[in-house]
Image (cartoon, coloured by chain):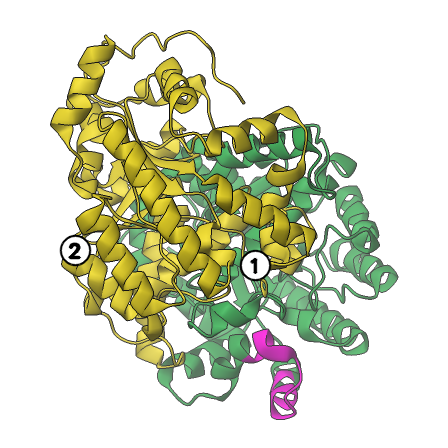
Chain colours: A green, B yellow
Amino acid sequence: MSAQATNNPTSENAGYLRIATEEAWAPIEMLDLYRRMLAKNEGGPGFERLIGHYMTSDAERPRFVRDRLTDLGESRLADMDAVGVDHAVLGLTSPGTQALAPDAAREIATLSNDHLAEACRRYPARFSGLAAVGFEDVPGAVKELERGITDLGLKGLICNSHIRGHYLDEQQFYPILEALEALEVPLYLHPNTPNDIMIGPLAEAGLDGGIYGFAVETGMHLLRIITSGVLDRFPRLKIVVGHLGEGLPFWFYRLDYMHGGQVASKRYEAIKPLQLKVSEYFRRNIWLTSSGMPWAPTIMYTREVVGPDRVMYAMDYPYQYLAEEVRMQDNLPMSSQEKVQFFQDNAIRVFDLDETAISSGRVSRV
Amino acid sequence: MSAQATNNPTSENAGYLRIATEEAWAPIEMLDLYRRMLAKNEGGPGFERLIGHYMTSDAERPRFVRDRLTDLGESRLADMDAVGVDHAVLGLTSPGTQALAPDAAREIATLSNDHLAEACRRYPARFSGLAAVGFEDVPGAVKELERGITDLGLKGLICNSHIRGHYLDEQQFYPILEALEALEVPLYLHPNTPNDIMIGPLAEAGLDGGIYGFAVETGMHLLRIITSGVLDRFPRLKIVVGHLGEGLPFWFYRLDYMHGGQVASKRYEAIKPLQLKVSEYFRRNIWLTSSGMPWAPTIMYTREVVGPDRVMYAMDYPYQYLAEEVRMQDNLPMSSQEKVQFFQDNAIRVFDLDETAISSGRVSRV
């Protein structure tokens, strides 16, 4: 769980900035609220199974996670230094606001954005942040997103998959997607446990979390966004997805073939013609990160099928904090230029990061 | 949908037998029963959504599918000839017996096995078959499996994923797995629509079928079999899975990492230590077929991570009948020897097929 304390051997001479793009944080106020909800059995089975362990266990790993989630200062920076991560793009940890009633969601989003923006201002070389919103109050979400991007300098929007069982392809959420497109910032579609309808058969087998349920839930969410026509309606919407695309790149041929068949048969009411093939949206609207998937075969496969300008580095700190995983990705069978793209340039481009500030941070540490 | 009528240009000179390993059939009696169930709204939403279209639509494709499903003679053989498929391993089409009440399931399994075995005896060069059973009557299933293999010469057992919401990792089914191990024949774990608990959010988006729901359902089923310890209990059990492993090979690193974490945390009651890593069972107990996934990048990736002796050809006739897909796989970037393995030898080995009979069939056709 915890990384080696030694400096990563390649951290100073790698030839690229290591920008980690799916890094989690949480305000203390949100964790306190989560604890109160757990005590009252509020939030549903997915919520309880996702965060109950981290909020209540006294074992080393959950204690480390809940300590580091709330830190936006020295401990986190020291951990980043220890494994050679130059810069972290921070998002509100799952489920974020998305297990909360609308009033609490709005309140947590606002204070999260304020805290996070303050840390980014304090450490511009080391941190960028994604805005949180309370999705169920759509006009409020649009306002808070605009404030987060325009006033606070945040770099995108975090969405921890389902919104108490609802999905972003529902028309009620279109104003949020419209605002993302207008602001030219990406949506980070992050995993959550499956919605409360679907979780049962996964939970009884212990498969509802990071091992499989996250992929089922988040892959379905991304596919719903595509097949519902959202990306035809908002053709400049940018979506970043972790875990190398939640498995969907494995399925490209079949997604295109089956979608074509579904359109032709008119058998499925919700399936309508799209302007592009399903897989083609991955080359126009979607970027993927390597969070939790530091393994060369899968990274190289995914780069092959979506293009090298679409895949970038992530760690998933503090949940998955391993020097070895940084090294595995340093050793990917790519040219030096391709590694710059993977660790640095793709992230700078899609999140519109301040390369000068980030570079100055690295220089000062060498 | 229908293949070109011309002979596949490479069918005579390919240098290998094309053995297709996930080919569907259905006795007329089962389709009649399905129609009666549909008329009475029996069988549940997954059943209705999976086969309602094929049983009732007058469009060309569903008419072709239901006509060819029931044919174990000249039409099917002509279609195989037209695309250069030498031999088909036939299994009862999804959901087979698994949407039926126990008495009907037993009856359909018995008559299916008799019909199928008769066709295999009549065309030993062209057809092999998998036994069907009524899973819910476990002692009856064991007997019918033994009859199917020992008396009728069938080559394995078809399981169309969930058994009215139940999964093979449940201890009630252990006698069936024990019989498979003793008989040294494989289980073919074939897709079905998600169980009735999970199907809702997929169905409302039109994603419950081959485009995504099959993978969610069947990937979960396979993972349940592994993580429940079934393959430690039955270490010589052989499982064949379609669609290149229902997406799980994409997740190997993460499955191993997360499973290790789950075991260490003792956080999930159903997750216990296993003798091997999750991914290692794919190199000991599991074989994969290319049904519905004829695309070179995914086939080559999967071969890389499970080994070339684990991946073999399938077509999914009559659902996916395309000469182009045969050609795509003829053109895979493999050596001639590797193609023999992919199209021919892996299937012969795992299903214990009669190579002499199959070869004689080819010779007589040239």
Secondary element at image label 2:
helix
The residue wearing badge 2 is B183
Closer mark to the observer between disc 1 and disc 2: 2
Residue A296 image position (x, y, % from top left): 31, 44
Queried whether the magenta region covers residue A42, the answer comes back as: yes
Can see residue B194? yes
The chain carrying label 1 is A
- Name the one closer to the observer, A180 or A20: A180
- Where's residue B10, x and y in %? 30, 10
Count of numbered tags: 2
Residue B337 quadrant: top left
Above or below for B256 versus B215: below
Residue type at mark 2 is: Leu
Quadrant location of the C terminus of chain B in the rendered image: top left
Per the rendering, the mark at residue A217 is: 1
Q: Is residue A351 visible?
A: no
